[in-house]
Image: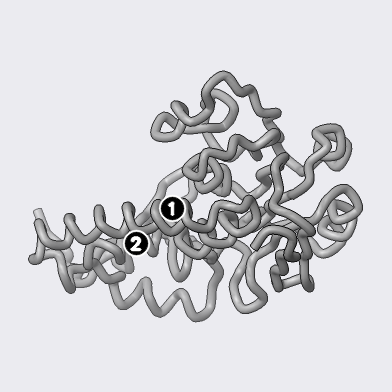
Amino acid sequence: AAGEELRFEHIYGETVLSKPAERVVSLGYNVHDALLALDVVPVGIRQWFGNQPYGVWPWAQSHLGDAKPQLISGEVSMEVVASLQPDLIVAVGAGISKDEYDVLSQIAPVLMQPKDEPAYGTGWDELTRMVGRAVGKTELAEKRIAEVEAQFQAVRDAHPDWSGMTAVCAYNFGGETGAFIGSDTRATFLLEPGFKPPQKIQSLSETQGFYARLSPEDVSRLFGRFQRLSA
């Protein structure tokens, strides 16, 4: 309701907004997608990967309009963030430390992931609801979530044979081979159409973070069932 404080408990304490935010700096690597889906263009966006205009990928570039957000590359520059004069900093999925949080909190209120979640483990729907509350667009956030869930349901209906099949998001980059696991967005995305992770990959989630390095000579963990083929 208008005039009421907005409170968010998170891993570093509690953030309180006296009113919905208007000038938002997006430090989480995929937070800007949720903001843009809610018709909120951040004044600053954290650079993630690839040479995309203002750090925004093709699926969301139309939401930028004529805006030209400040691109924040590499380590978070407190001076750059302060110069943008935000009234909210969203650092869910940014992996910042408590010390960095304390400094950023002197600039503007900072949103972090819930206390029971890892740095990169907040689901897309939970993130959208959190950001929606913070910018005063709760109803629109629920609408966007429902739209995406309907798309996932349509895929499941079209491919019932995928239910129970195994799938994994793997990578080979910079000489390193591995797979995204646990609550990482790339891993959980594959669950939505009905897939499940291979058992050997799933077991790694209990001991490692959001990704697991694998030997490039032995990628058998990527497969539900692995059979060595001979010439």
Mark 2 vs mark 1, foreground winner is 1
Q: Which residue is mark 2?
A: 218
Residue 110 horizontal side relative to residue 198, left or right: right
Q: Are marks 2 and 1 in contact (CB under 8 Å)?
A: no
Q: Amino acid at mark 1?
A: Thr
Quarter location, residue 102: bottom right
Q: Give percent across and percent down for residue 167.
A: 26, 62
Q: Nearer the viewer, residue 113 or 224?
A: 113
Real-space Cα separation, disc 2 to disc 1, in angstroms? 10 Å
Residue drawn 44% across and 26% down?
A: 62
From the image, tell me which residue sits under label 1.
177
**Residue 61, which numbered label?**
none
Which residue is at a point 53% across and 79% down the rendered structure image?
A: 207
Q: Residues within 10 Å of mark 1 (few under 14, many from 20)?
A: some
Inspect the image, locate mark 2, and give the three-letter code of the amino acid beneath it.
Asp
Q: Is residue 94 above or below residue 65?
A: below
At x 18%, y 56%, the residue is 155
In the picture, measured across the screen, residue 114 lies left or right of residue 110, that is left
In the rendered image, the residue lying farthest to the front is 2
Q: Secondary structure at mark 2?
A: loop
Residue at image position (9%, 53%) is 231
Q: Is residue 104 left or right of residue 59?
A: right
Element at label 1: strand
> Residue 147: x and y, percent?
32, 53
The mark nearer the N terminus, 2 or 1, is 1
- Observer able to see residue 164: yes
Residue 212 shows in this picture: no
**Few, some or many C-alpha atoms within 10 Å of disc 2 (few <14, some 14-19, many ≥20)?**
few
